[in-house]
Image: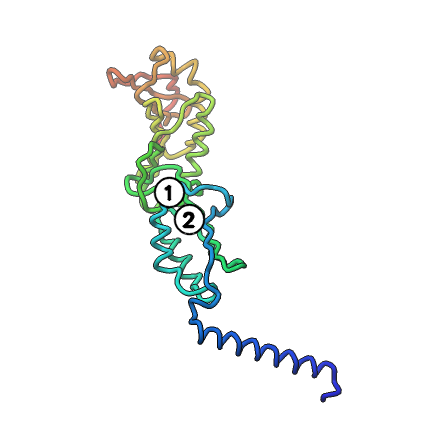
Amino acid sequence: MWDSHRSLNFVSNTLLLTAAAALIYTLVQHYGLPRFLPLKTVYIQGMQDERAELNYITREQIEKIMQRHVQGNFLSIDLIAVRDAFIHLPWVRDARVERTWPLALNIRLEEHQPLAHWGSHALVNTYGEVFRTVLDEKMPVFTAPMEVNSQEITRRYRQFSQALAPLQQSIAEINLSSRHAWRLHLNTGTVLELGRHEVEKRLLRYVSVYHHSIAPLNDDKPLAYVDLRYTNGFAVYMPETGKPMKGKQTSRKET
C-alpha cells in the first residue's frame, strides 16, 4: 500500500483536509461564529446594470431587511432568506443574492418598470405583469374582468398605440368589458368603440380615414365618441351636443 503513489496522495490529502477542518473548528469555537470570516461589504446593484439607480425601492426598506436578515458571518448568512425578504417588497420583480470574495455580499435587484394602472389598486409592468402597489403618476389605465390575462391587455395596448402613432394620439385608458368588447379613451378626450371583433382592423380604418372623414366633422377638434362597430363605416358624437352624426355608414352595426 505504502509503495503506491496514488495511495500516498490520498492519505496526505485526507490528513490535510482533517487538519484544516480542525483548525476552522478551533477558530470558530475560540472567536465565535459571527467573528470568524465577518462580512465586510454589502453591494446593492441593479439586475441588468450595476450602475443603475433604484427608483422605487427605498433606503429604509433595504436597511430594514439588512437588520433582520443579514445575520452571522460570510459563510452562515442565509442567502435564500435574504432573497425572499427582498422579493416580498412591492417594487421588486426579481432578486439575486450571492457571496463574493473577499467577504462581501452582492445583492442584485430588478425593479418593476410601471407601464399602466391596473384598475385603481395595482399596476402593470412592462412585461404585462400585475403587481400590488399604487403610484401617483399619470399613466394609462387598464380595466378588465378579473379572469382576463393582463399580458393580453398589454399586448393590445402596444398594438393599438402603434396604430395610433401616425395621428399623434395616445391611449389614456383601455377598457375591456365583461362581454370582451374593447373601448379606448384617447388623450384627446375621444372615446373609440371597437367592439369584440376585428378590433385592430377597425382601429386601422379609423386612422386611415381620420384626416379626411372624421376630423372635418368638428373643424379638426376632438370628437366625443366614435363608434367603429360597422363593417365599412362609423358613427360619431359631437362633444357639445352629445348627438350622433353618421359618417360613411354603409352596412349594419356589429359587435
Q: Nearer the viewer, residue 209 or 9?
A: 9
Image quarter of residue 169 = top left
Q: Position of residue 117 (x, y in %)?
A: 34, 38
The secondary structure type at the circle numbered 2 is strand
Q: Nearer the viewer, residue 202 or 64?
A: 64
In three-dimensional space, the C-alpha distance between marks 1 and 2, rounded to whole angstroms, equals 12 Å
Mark 1, Cα crowd under 10 Å, few <14 / some 14-19 / many 20+, is few
Q: Can see residue 210?
A: yes
Left or right: 241 with respect to 216? left
Regarding mark 1 in the picture, which secondary structure is present there?
A: loop
Residue closer to the observer: 246 or 126: 126
Please, which residue is most extreme toward the bottom here? 1
Residue in the image at 37% along x and 37% along y: 116
Label 1 amino acid? Tyr
Foreground residue among 145 and 248:
145
Residue named by callout 1: 56
Numbered label attached to residue 93: 2
Q: CB of mark 1 within 8 Å of CB of mark 2?
A: no
- Residue 153 visible in the picture: no
In the shown orientation, is residue 242 left or right of residue 48? Answer: left
